[in-house]
Image: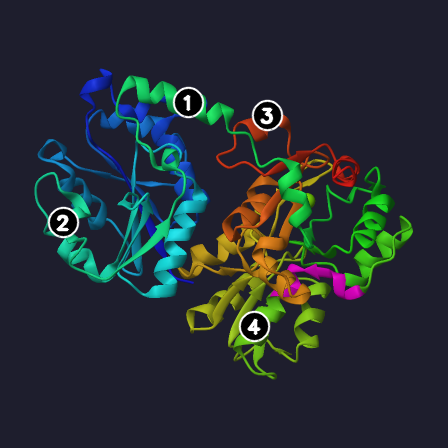
Amino acid sequence: MSRVAGILLAAGGSTRFGRSKQLLDWGGKPLVAHVADVALAAGLDPVVVVLGCEAEAVRAALADRPVRTAMNWRWEEGMSTSVRAGLAVLPLDVEAAVFLQCDQPLVGPDLVRRLVARWEETGAPIAHPVCEGRRATPVLFARSLFPELARVTGDQGGRALIGRHPTATVEVDDPDLLADVDTPEEYERLIELQDAESRVPAQTLLPRLRYLIVDMDGVLWRGDRPAPGLQDFFAFLRERDVRFVLATNNASKRPDQYAEKLARFGVEVPMDCILTSAQATAAYLAEREPEGTPVHVIGGEGLRAALTEQGFVLTEKGARYVVVGWDPDLTWRKLARATLLIRKGAGFIGTNPDRTFPSEEGLVPGNGAQLAALEAATDVPPVVIGKPEPWLYREAMRRMGATVEATGVVGDRLDTDILGGVRLGLATILVLSGITTEEDLAGSPFRPDLVCADIGELVRIWSTI
Ligand SMILES: [Mg+2]
């Protein structure tokens, strides 16, 4: 996948408001933080916030979000100086950048993703939304245009380039989605609009779902207790002919261990309906490399089994890939061996990004912590297969022959299950029977399409439709 950056233009002063628009309240957080969250939820990487007017206050408003900042000392000379400041700090492997305005609060992750997808499809070096025949922002520029963009002067920004190059467009039906906060009156109107905009109601969402990707821990059970309504949930899916894959970021167990657990709770599911991140990792590699490719593994039985089933040869020396899953027997020696292989050029793959997981004594290191240790030792970031990265969900969809429009995800974690769905444009259903609380939800930069107490409630709502 292409690496696309986000450049958030947050340097300007706003005379009409008497204070920076960047700091206006939007749903309990400053506008600049809201737009940064949209960029992050859309998968832009890195997200660069260009600071100028009231730089310190704007920087503080971003709190501890994983964004970079670029200072534009010349912000009063106009937009072009901010564009240049943002471009200057982009890593060299960024292939395109989406320029986001700080004052378009209803631009969501979905529109940003559609711009990126249009650029990938068409190869046009510019992509922007069009509404009622008029050109609008945010605009994506490909790297090939960065030098020309950096030469623009005055208050023009990237507008100067449009018309000179092939352009891809994304149609937006509702002009309010692109509206900008220009006056205090417009600000009030957009806030009301946002409040009134309910989430996609169940009546329009659920009937179109033919495929479900369902997380297990926290959704189907909690510890050793089945979720209320577990058997009814599967009976309902069969009755409505909804195909499903049960997908987990956990790479340490084999699918048959999950099937056994479900059988204990009185639910029989075929083995190919269970997908672990270990299997998705093996499938990812099998699409790219021939059988017999030597692979070095840190991780448990589940991961080893998945890789050998795909015909890979597990080895200590001469590996083409280092594949890392959670390993309770991790030692310095194992880390050293993996580090040496990666430094010699072996590909670096992680099954899942979970940095911690709960134990009886509290949070303990998960696979993400192991990956961080290896990244620190090698300066190589891993390709991560599990949620919220797309590979696990893509493998689940491939197994079902599913389409984006007809697929939903059900999960209990916002930062993995739901974010992964949001990034792929799938319908997202959050259950509150696992890790996420109402408070977490209120503070989240992205919203699931539907929230249910548990799968029992989901079935109750769905069966009335
Ligand atoms: Mg879960």
Find the distance from the CA under tag 4 to the CA under tag 3: 39 Å
Q: Identify the magenta region.
A: 271-280
Find the distance from the CA under tag 1 to the CA under tag 3: 21 Å
Q: Residue at x 25, y 60 (%)?
A: 143
Camera-nearest label, 4 or 3: 3
Mark number, residue 277: none
**Can you identify the residue that label 4 sits on?**
285
Marks 4 and 3, the one that precedes in the sequence: 4
For residue 392, above or below residue 197: below
Mark 2 neighbour density, 10 Å: few (under 14) some (14–19) many (20 or more)? some
Q: Amino acid at mark 3?
A: Glu
Q: Amino acid at mark 4?
A: Leu
In the figure, residue 187 lies in which quadrant? top left
SS for callout 2:
helix
**Can you identify the residue that label 2 sits on?**
160
SS for callout 3:
helix
Camera-nearest label, 3 or 2: 2
Q: Amino acid at mark 2?
A: Ala
- Asked if residue 363 shows in the view, the reply is no
